[in-house]
Amino acid sequence: MGQQIQIQQQDFSVDAIYTAMRLEYGSDIGAIASFVGLVRDRNAVAGDGGDVQTLTLEHYPGMTEKSIQQILDHAEARWPLIATHVVHRVGTMAPSEQIVLVMVASAHRDAAFAGAQYVMDCLKTEAVFWKNEQSDLGQGWVESTNADKIRAKRWDD
Amino acid sequence: MSQHSAAESGVNIDVKFFASLREQVGVAELQINATNLAALLKELKTHLSDVGFDHLLSPNIRLAVNQNLVEGDWREAALVFAAGDEVAFLPPVTGG
């Protein structure tokens, strides 16, 4: 089972990663599910009304990769996955830019869909990143939301 | 041959602060001489402002030692440090 984790400032090509995954695992793969998260211009910082102009992602080199690896390990233990690939960008991004990619390959669609959703839900609550929004009214750290915690919790059983 | 005999009573550890917490304490990284958690907190209290120090203790702050999260309430953990250990104070994560 292949895991790939990339933390990087630069943008990524979904197409290139998808093609590489198909090449590497060939006809074992029957399904690939991918999710791409984009930067929104809607402000998440309470009390600030400004539109987001830029979003900056901070991470903890080493520990961030480890936290994602744990998520992928849990996903593999739960579903028969053939390959998982996560790209998470850090640094400063503008609205509509790509920020995160989760791509999961499996023999069948159920595991691919569920695995991708699980990994994404856990990235929100367990992966070691912090978001800071900058608007014309200033800057602020995004707070973790209960909705995200509840989404991740539904996988506990 | 140590020229810093005072340091022999403890060990130097790297202490890191991230994101909102880094801004609240006003520093990203400190070298602290401490062999356990109680000694570390005592040292940090002298290095940081009262307000900054209080932020470290707020309930949602988690602690990682050598990039492993301390399970449960780290404030109650019997943590012992070795030279070169990396101790990080982490505010709630907001990735994805």
Image: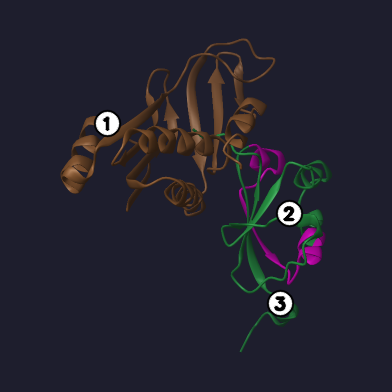
Chain colours: A brown, B green
Report the chain holding disc 1.
A
| In the rendered image, residues at marks 2 and 3 fall on the same chain | yes
Which mark lies nearer to you, 2 or 3? 2
The residue positioned 62% from the left and 10% from the top of the image is A49
Q: Earlier in the sequence, mark 2 or mark 3?
A: 3
Mark 2 neighbour density, 10 Å: few (under 14) some (14–19) many (20 or more): few
Amino acid bearing label 3: Ala
Instruction: In this rendered view, identify the residue nearer to me: A119 or A137.
Output: A119
Q: Quadrant of residue A150?
A: top right
- A52 left or right, relative to A26: right
- Looking at the figure, which quarter contains the C terminus of chain A? top right
**Residue A102 visible in the picture:** no
Tags 2 and 3 touching, CB below 8 Å:
no
Q: CA distance from mark 1 to mark 3?
A: 52 Å
The residue positioned 38% from the left and 38% from the top of the image is A111
Residue annotated with mark 3: B7
| In the rendered image, residues at marks 1 and 3 fall on the same chain | no
Q: Quadrant of residue A27?
A: top left
Is residue A115 positioned above or below B84 on the image? above
Amino acid bearing label 1: Val
Amino acid bearing label 2: Gly
**Magenta extent:** B20-42
